[in-house]
Amino acid sequence: MKLLIALLLACASAFGHGVHASLTSIQFNEASKSLEIVMVMSADDVETVLRRDTGKQIEVDRGAEQLVFGYIAKSLEIRGLKLQWVGMEVSVQKITAYLEAKVPSGDPNGLNIRNDLLLDLLNDQVNILSVKRAGKPNAKASEHLFNSRGTWQTVKLP
């Protein structure tokens, strides 16, 4: 999986924007009983989908946080958990969004996740998801691919 991620990133760099992929990292923080979520996606593609949905000229670096969060909240779902917006960083090519979700049971194993990010815009979009426990740098991550809308996957933490 790491090879696939490296290949996707290399292709995206070499060909400008020839690969449509997002990367999502979820870490379970045992102390706070929460999932810490970092999503990296194409700024151009998010602007395009927000323009389509609102009918307005949107620039994600100019006060569009609520629109970006609204789109992410429609696209990324963790069954039974509520996503909370933490913030985002925007560069010319990418948006890095930060979210969290409390795990009331304290047990994140068997999470059901749907990641439809940008799949409503791009036929070749691939969403890569990596899940692991925070504070365990040598622990192997559980890695998943989402490339069709409405697909749910059960995710287990290693």
Image: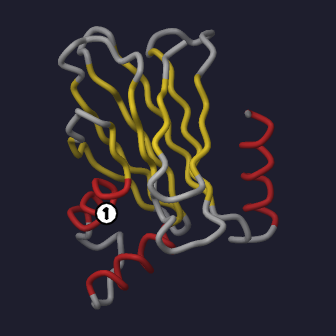
Q: Nearer the viewer, residue 117 or 25?
A: 117
> Above or below — where is 74 with respect to 51?
above
User: What is the quadrant of the C terminus in the image?
Assistant: top right
Residue for point 53% across, 64% down: 42
Q: Secondary structure at mark 1?
A: helix
Kindly identify which residue carries mark 1: 71
Residue for point 62% across, 55% down: 126
Color theme of the render: secondary structure
Q: Nearer the viewer, residue 37 or 114?
A: 114
Q: Nearer the viewer, residue 92 or 34?
A: 34
The spot of residue 68 in percent (x, y) is 31, 63
How many numbered marks are there?
1
User: What is the quadrant of the N terminus in the image?
Assistant: top right
Residue for point 50% across, 51% down: 40
Q: Is 114 left or right of 57, judged from the image as shown?
A: right
Amino acid type for the residue under numbered disc 1: Tyr
> Above or below — where is 136 with respect to 70?
above
